[in-house]
Structure formats: structure tokens, C-alpha cells
């Protein structure tokens, strides 16, 4: 069985739903409260590759930091620039993210995590 990691924000309803889903499935998993312990740039890059997404696809546009940084008007030009912003402002990272180190899924809606698990990603 692969080790599952949940990038979690306990203030987020969807993240809490995914946490309960993983607990109910009786899976072993690690929880990373990513606002308190932001992922490194290398970890973010790896997660994006596992998600098969570009950084612009992971950003939460409704956050105050998105407006404050004027990311809608002047988005970063490179992957590295996005990764630096995410590491400095982890609130901008879409959540929750569940990974087994090989593949990952964003749990919005939480059913996506259930589907991901049923495809054998916890093995």
C-alpha cells in the first residue's frame, strides 16, 4: 500500500469532508496542514506533475491575496514564478490535495477522491 498524504486546511469544508472520507476508508495517511507548513517549491512542482496541471490551474482566484498580488491582471510568466508565489502564499493553493506520491487529486468535489481511491491509488 502506498502512503497517502492529505494537504489539508481544517477551516475548509471540502477539506474536512475529504479527511472524513479517508478516515472512514480506514486508510493510513499523513496530514499536512499546508497553511502552517507550506510545501517546498520542489514538492509543489511534484504535486503539479502528479495532478497533471499547470500552476495557473491550481490557484484559488477568490482569495484576497490573489487580488492583492494582482495575479489576474499580471499573472506570473513562468512556472518557477508561480511556484514561488504558492510557497509564499499557500492560501492560493487549491485544496484539498490527496497524493500517493505517484498520482494526486484535488478533492473538489470530495467524490473525486473517492473515485481516485477506487482506481487503486491507495495500493
Image (spheres, rainbow, N blue to C red):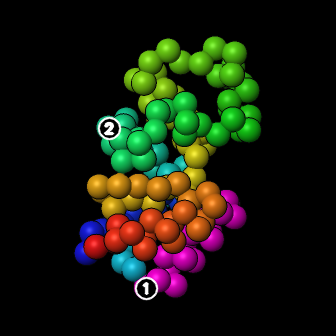
Task: Say the numbered circle drawn on residue 43.
Answer: none
Work out whether residue 102 or residue 31 is closer to the camera in this orientation and state it: 102
**Percent x, y of residue 107:** 56, 60
- Secondary element at tag 2: helix
User: Residue at point 34% right, 71% down?
Assistant: 120
Q: How many neighbours does mark 2 have within 10 angstroms: few (below 14), some (14-19), or many (20 or more)?
A: few
- According to the picture, the residue beneath numbered tag 2 turns out to be 42
Crowdedness of circle 1 by 10 Å Cα count: few (<14), some, many (20+)?
A: few
Give the residue at mark 1. Answer: 26
In terms of depth relative to the viewer, which is nearer, 112 or 17? 112
Give SS at disc 1: loop
Q: Is residue 14 magenta?
A: yes
Residue 68 shown left or right of residue 112 in the figure? right
Q: Is residue 44 left or right of residue 107?
A: left
Q: Is residue 46 visible?
A: yes
Judge whether residue 47 can be spotted in this image: no
What secondary structure is the stretch in magenta mostly built from? helix
At horizontal 53% and vertical 18% (from top left) the residue drawn is 76
Number of callouts: 2
Q: Position of residue 40 (x, y in %)?
A: 37, 40
Q: Quadrant of the C terminus?
A: bottom left
Quarter of the image for the N terminus: give it.
bottom left
Q: Residue at x 58, y 46 (%)?
A: 94
Most distant residue in the left direction:
1
Using the image, determine if residue 32 lies above or below residue 2.
above
Quadrant in which residue 63 is drawn: top right
Which residue is at a point 65% across and 22% down the rendered structure image? Answer: 71
Q: Position of residue 56 (x, y in %)?
A: 55, 30
> Over which residues does the magenta segment extend?
10-26
Mark-to-mark CA distance, 2 and 1? 29 Å
Q: Earlier in the sequence, mark 2 or mark 1?
A: 1
Amino acid at each position: 500500500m502506498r502512503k497517502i498524504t492529505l494537504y489539508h486546511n481544517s477551516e475548509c469544508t471540502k477539506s474536512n469532508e475529504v479527511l472524513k472520507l479517508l478516515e472512514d476508508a480506514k486508510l493510513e495517511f499523513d496530514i499536512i496542514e499546508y497553511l502552517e507548513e507550506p510545501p517546498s517549491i520542489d514538492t509543489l512542482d511534484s504535486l503539479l506533475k502528479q495532478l497533471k496541471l499547470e500552476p495557473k490551474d491550481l490557484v484559488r482566484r477568490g482569495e484576497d491575496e490573489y487580488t492583492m498580488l494582482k495575479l489576474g491582471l499580471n499573472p506570473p510568466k513562468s512556472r518557477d514564478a508561480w511556484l514561488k508565489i504558492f510557497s509564499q502564499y499557500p492560501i492560493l493553493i487549491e485544496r484539498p490535495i490527496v497524493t500517493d506520491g505517484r498520482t494526486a487529486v484535488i478533492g473538489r468535489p470530495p467524490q473525486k477522491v473517492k473515485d481516485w481511491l477506487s482506481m487503486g491509488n491507495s495500493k
